[in-house]
Image: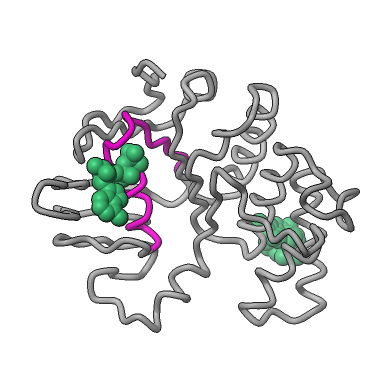
Amino acid sequence: MIEFKNVFKQYSDDIIASNDINIRIDQGEFVYVVGPSGAGKSTFIKMMYHEEQATSGEITVNNFQLQTMKPKEVPFLRRDLGIVFQDFKLLPRLTIFENIAYALEVIEKEPAEIKERVDYVLDLVDLADKSDKFPEELSGGEQQRIAIARAVANKPEVLIADEPTGNLDPETSDDIMAILEKVNKQGTTVIMATHNSIIVNKYPHRLLAIEDGRIARDEEGGKYGYEN
Ligand code: ADP
Ligand code: ADP
């Protein structure tokens, strides 16, 4: 469960990126975050994994109270979160297998479990045959599928995706959506910031529209509603 209560984020005197955000997202939901550029989408999402901290208000993510959390607890918060970025952020000198395994090694999983998990998630994104390739040998869409596999390898409660289809063509974006919906059906909350109106309208889910740092719309199956 993710809850924001009266959350404000002020970067400077004249920049209020979150202006009294009140929102609750239950476990297992699929939520789009949309809105014009500069509206505060990234700030909203970054506060969930404590990359940015609220100026005031309360944020609860899973069982963590972020405003009173100690720095040493941040890695534990992030263990329950999978994060996917527009630019994939795969490590170029590691193979696909190693990229995913590395994420599990840093949280000290046993080698046998790592092998099992990596094989499972490569299968989930239908790229088991690319295990020994390097990222640059894969297409953009394939790299994003690997980034999602890596993000869900630790079975996170929440998968956060910031513009996951931002660099991808429509057909490839459909593949990414199929994977995100599959992950969601397994019980993982999916939160996806996007400018992709075609995707939002084609795969209806709860939609949060952020404008000027406020939640301007919160609709089940909402339409995109902006010029791209
Ligand atoms: P979006 O993701 O919707 O484009 P952001 O959350 O990135 O919006 O930005 C919201 C506002 O906060 C914008 O005015 C942006 O310029 C500002 N902003 C974002 N990050 C910072 C930062 N690190 N320092 C100062 N201002 C920032
Ligand atoms: P369970 O999750 O109860 O172990 P499943 O049938 O869902 O049972 O999973 C079978 C195997 O796949 C298990 O070994 C589990 O660790 C692994 N697995 C399931 N879901 C995921 C996931 N999202 N990410 C990584 N491994 C998974």
* Total numbered labels placed on residues in the image: 0
The picture quadrant where one finds residue 226 is top left
Q: For this rendering, which residue is in front, 184 or 81?
A: 81
Q: How is the image coloured?
A: one colour
Q: Is residue 34 left or right of residue 22?
A: right
Q: For the point 82% across and 55% down, which residue is it?
A: 134
In the picture, which quadrant includes the C terminus?
top left
Q: Does 2 sit above or below residue 50?
A: above
Name above or below for residue 118 compared with residue 108.
above
Q: At which x and y percent is residue 117?
A: 75, 64
Q: Where does the magenta region start and end?
A: 29-49
Which residue is rendered at x = 47% and y = 44% of the image?
162
Tell me where residue 170 sits by quadrant. top right
Where does ligand 2 appear, by image quarter? bottom right
The magenta stretch spans residue 34: yes
**Rendering coords of residue 179 (x, y %):** 66, 39
In this image, 30 relative to 42: left or right?
right
At horizontal 81% and vertical 50% (from top left) the residue drawn is 123
Q: Would residue 84 be visible to someone looking at this image?
A: yes
Residue drawn 23% across the image and 32% down it: 211
Picture coordinates of residue 190 (x, y %)? 49, 45
